[in-house]
Amino acid sequence: MKHVLCFLAAVFVFFFFSSFCEKNAADVLVVGTNAEFPPFEMRGGADGNEIVGFDIDVARKVAEKSGKRLIVEDMKFDALIPALNAGKVDMVLAGMTVTPERAENVDFSEPYYKVTQIVLLRGSDAGKIKKIDDLKGKKIAVALGTTGDTVASSLTSADGLVRFDSVFEAVMELKNGKVDLVLTDEALGGVLHSKNPDLARVDLPFKDEYYAAAVKKGNKKLLDQINASLEDLKNTGEMDILLERHFSE
Ligand code: ARG
């Protein structure tokens, strides 16, 4: 009898907790990001270790709209699309550029920000790069799996390309004289240039790139909620206020 009671209690506890967990899973919205990309996502906030930034504000808005609690998962940039497709995150907001290759694997929201690639050089090398062709044969540092990586791959040989997990590491390598230049998005590149007076910035006619949120292919419900949130942010003027705030941080 005692055993039967124990068994029934265990079954009850099991079902109680599994329904609790399921309910929780339905109540949360998980955004994947790579918090090494200010002002779109970075560590900061009150304790310095919270993940903040423009993309996180957008993600919070989407969570609000869908009545869910937001959870932010930080990972390497090149792990984001696999995590989305494995169901580990519901959406990606990571200053991610829409590319035809990525669009084969995920669905993108409407674009929310436009950038292009820029070149960062040591100040002493300023003037050495004047056109895209001058990048050929140079030793270029990029962040792994980014559009900067794709552009650099089309310009230099495999030996000439050094890939890092973040643009910050690429810039360290540049400062240490180990590479000739860094290729990165104007958003972060501009911030790094203004904070590092020893660096020079060169703007070349690279293609325009557009940031968008990504969801698993076919997740129309979430995509609609993201697009509606972006629309709201634009219409209320909140988007410009948030961008301005994060860029001036
Ligand atoms: N826009 C570039 C890309 O999509 C770089 C994005 C890097 N974002 C980040 N959170 N590290 O490839």
Image (spheres, grey):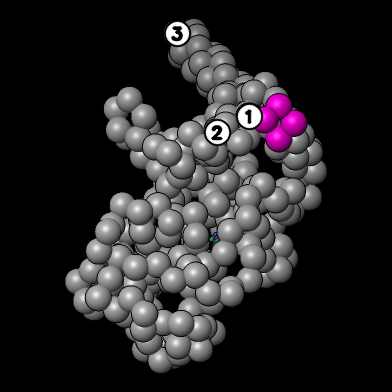
Quarter of the image that includes the C terminus: top left
Residue 180 is covered by the magenta coloring: no
**Residue 237 falls within the magenta-colored stretch:** yes
Q: Give residue 14's position: percent from left, percent from top.
A: 53, 21
Q: CA distance from mark 1 to mark 3?
A: 62 Å
The residue type indicated by label 2 comes to Leu
Range drawn in magenta: 234-238
211 sits to left or right of 186: right
Mark 2 or 3, nearer chain start: 3
Residue at 72 percent across and 48 percent down: it is: 109
Secondary structure found at label 3: helix
User: Are the two marked residues, 1 and 2, in contact with CB atoms closer than 8 angstroms?
Assistant: yes
**What residue is at 63 percent from the left and 71 percent from the top?**
207
Please, is residue 177 above or below residue 99 in the view?
below
Camera-nearest label, 2 or 3: 2
Q: Main secondary structure of the magenta part?
A: helix
Q: Report the residue marked by disc 2.
A: 242
Q: Is residue 45 above or below residue 13?
A: below
Residue located beneath label 3 in the image: 2
Nearer to us in this view, 200 or 106: 200
| Residue 146 in the image, given as x and y percentages of width and height | 51, 66
Which element carries disc 2, helix, strand or loop? helix
- CA gap, disc 2 to disc 3? 62 Å
The number of discs equals 3
Residue 66 position within the rendered picture, expressed as x and y whole percent measured from the top left: 70, 26
Callout 2–callout 3 Cβ contact below 8 Å: no
List the residue tagged with mark 1.
238
Disc 1 is placed on an element classified as helix
